[in-house]
Image: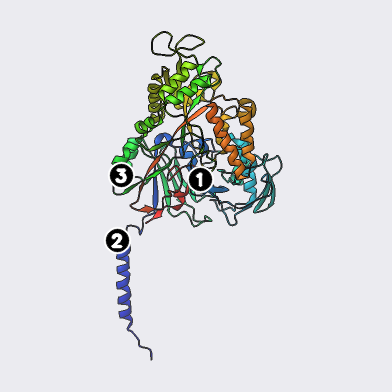
């Protein structure tokens, strides 16, 4: 026998539960609020358009902007292995690492709903490298007419040169929609790209040049990520304003660079912030201009004396307050390509003086400054740096003080960034003797050696030291095409040895990255990479961060 319950009692019970549910929903702050990752940037870093430009490779915000909107063939996984993680391409097939077959992930869509096909992959491969040299790295150059579309999800192509290492080609390369860019295929940078239609995990919601950028989650993205509803990029007028925004909880993280060591003492006291300390992705070095025929810098003995006179530990303490490590190579010490047996130039003032004395550079007029053995005048070193970085000016000042102890006169030329680059990348103009430089090679860093490829070997434009060494050129080319990892390491070891033997550059330090993250409402910040929670090799924080 079924026991019947009076309807008004059932309704009364239901209404009571409904009311309680409504009360609970209304009282919950997450009930109606979108989850948002708020990212702070220095106002000078904000993009001025959505166009494809070299900012997508060379500028902090540009590097992150396109990785949210556009998928790419593959990404680096976290340390220590930094393995290849497939993204738009799920299968990379090759027998000789020159001829390749890529298999596109099925079910991918553009933000406007159209399907992503092999036509799009082929279009980008063929035309993007020619539209902007930024995208024409050696692993993105194909043999003419070698790109063949097999079906909607399969494409064959041949590289101009065999690709070494363990990775696939077309690294850090956006998948572009053919239907949007086909009218501009020979000049893709001319397309205004205002909608920025991609196939990445986020869509562009609003772009207000210099004011803000808002991204929203792409609901039809192939992966489970992203896990926040939107991301906002907000500009601030300098480091003090950014630090105050972090302190007040107005932003959750910084877009690329970390905070200064001095700011750590203030921000680490905030209960909503956690300071993530990571080994940096940036390496800092000195460049010696070897072009001027009559400059003492062209004498290897002078360069040896200079590097012996430099006190790296003092620089690290005075400029970075201990948040950096001394370094001696273009390769990170945790990677298998690093040579652990490199010759050391220990800080030794007396040894530096002895080297200069024996090379004939002595103080002949009693003014405590050494004289050029050929000209007789005081040696005066033009030291180029940029006012864009307070740290670089401080380092230059310390080096000037250190070199004065061995009788070398240093004239610091601190210039705006554009002028600095104009002079640095044209060593033939003899506008500097020594320059402060740096780069972010990343774990897959074969390209970094292009800074030393000779002019005749095709190195014009990158070779800031005007270093000319055919033996070095051959080793760079061999490294690019060697896929036996043991043999690759042998070549890498040799390159590093020659770098320290000839001293066209001298690596100084690897600054740590100090990243404050707001842990009140969000978690999942990706900390398993060099360079902090957000940089060009680590967009994973934007994909993984999620509400608590």
User: Which residue in the structure is indicated by mark 1?
Assistant: 67
Where is the C terminus found, in terms of image quarters?
Answer: bottom left
Give the camera-side residue of 331 and 236.
331
The percent coordinates of residue 113 (x first, y second) are: 56, 53
Give me the disc on residue 213: none
Locate the N terminus by quadrant.
bottom left
Relative to 422, say whether 63 is above or below. Answer: below
Q: Which residue is mark 2?
A: 27
Q: Can you say whether 302 is above or below 190 in the image?
A: above
- Vertical order, 47 against 7 (above or below): above
Mark 2 burial class by Cα count in 10 Å: few <14, some 14-19, many 20+: few
User: Is residue 35 visible in the rendered structure shown here?
Assistant: yes
Residue at image position (46%, 37%) is 282
Q: Is residue 435 above or below residue 199?
A: above
Residue for badge 3:
268
Labels 3, 2: front one: 3
Q: Earlier in the sequence, mark 1 or mark 2?
A: 2
């Amino acid at each position: 026998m079924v026991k019947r319950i009076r309807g008004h009692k059932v309704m009364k019970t239901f209404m009571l539960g409904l009311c309680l549910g409504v009360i609970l929903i209304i009282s919950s702050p997450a009930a109606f609020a979108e989850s948002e990752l708020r990212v702070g940037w220095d106002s000078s870093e904000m993009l001025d358009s959505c166009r494809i430009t070299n900012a997508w490779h060379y500028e902090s915000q540009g590097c992150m902007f396109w990785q949210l909107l556009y998928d790419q063939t593959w990404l680096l996984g976290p340390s220590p292995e930094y393995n290849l993680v497939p993204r738009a391409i799920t299968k990379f097939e090759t027998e000789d690492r020159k001829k390749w077959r890529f298999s596109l992930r099925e079910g991918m869509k553009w933000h406007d709903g159209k399907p992503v096909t092999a036509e799009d992959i082929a279009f980008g491969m063929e035309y993007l490298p020619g539209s902007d040299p930024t995208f024409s790295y050696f692993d993105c150059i194909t043999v003419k007419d070698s790109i063949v579309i097999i079906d909607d999800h399969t494409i064959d192509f041949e590289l101009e040169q065999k690709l070494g290492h363990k990775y696939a080609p077309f690294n850090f390369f956006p998948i572009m929609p053919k239907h949007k860019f086909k009218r501009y295929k020979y000049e893709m940078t001319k397309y205004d790209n205002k909608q920025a239609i991609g196939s990445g995990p986020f869509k562009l919601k609003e772009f207000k040049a210099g004011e803000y950028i808002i991204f929203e989650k792409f609901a039809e993205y192939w992966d489970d990520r992203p896990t926040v509803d939107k991301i906002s990029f907000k500009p601030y007028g300098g480091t003090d304003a950014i630090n105050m925004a972090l302190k007040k909880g107005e932003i959750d993280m910084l877009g690329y660079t970390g905070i200064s060591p001095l700011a750590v003492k203030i921000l680490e006291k905030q209960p909503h912030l956690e300071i993530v300390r990571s080994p940096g992705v940036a390496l800092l070095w000195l460049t010696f201009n070897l072009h001027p025929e009559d400059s003492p810098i062209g004498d290897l003995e002078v360069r040896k004396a200079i590097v012996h006179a430099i006190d790296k530990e003092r620089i690290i303490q005075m400029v970075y307050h201990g948040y950096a490590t001394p370094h001696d190579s273009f390769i990170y010490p945790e990677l298998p390509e690093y040579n652990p047996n490199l010759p050391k130039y220990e800080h030794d003032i007396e040894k530096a003086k002895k080297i200069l004395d024996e090379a004939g550079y002595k103080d002949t007029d009693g003014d405590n400054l050494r004289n050029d053995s050929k000209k007789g005048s005081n040696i005066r070193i033009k030291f180029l740096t940029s006012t864009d970085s307070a740290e670089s000016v401080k380092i230059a000042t310390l080096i000037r003080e250190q070199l004065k102890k061995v009788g070398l006169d240093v004239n610091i030329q601190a210039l705006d960034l554009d002028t600095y680059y104009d002079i640095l990348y044209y060593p033939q103009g003899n506008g500097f003797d020594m320059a402060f430089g740096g780069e972010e090679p990343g774990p897959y860093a074969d390209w970094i050696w292009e800074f030393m490829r000779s002019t005749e070997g095709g190195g014009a434009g990158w070779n800031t030291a005007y270093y000319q060494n055919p033996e070095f050129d051959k080793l760079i080319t061999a490294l690019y095409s060697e896929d036996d990892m043991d043999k690759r390491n042998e070549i890498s070891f040799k390159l590093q040895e020659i770098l320290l033997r000839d001293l066209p550059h001298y690596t100084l330090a690897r600054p740590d990255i100090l990243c404050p993250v707001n842990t009140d409402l969000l978690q999942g910040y990706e900390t398993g990479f060099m360079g902090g929670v957000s940089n060009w090799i680590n967009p994973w924080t934007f994909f993984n961060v999620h509400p608590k």
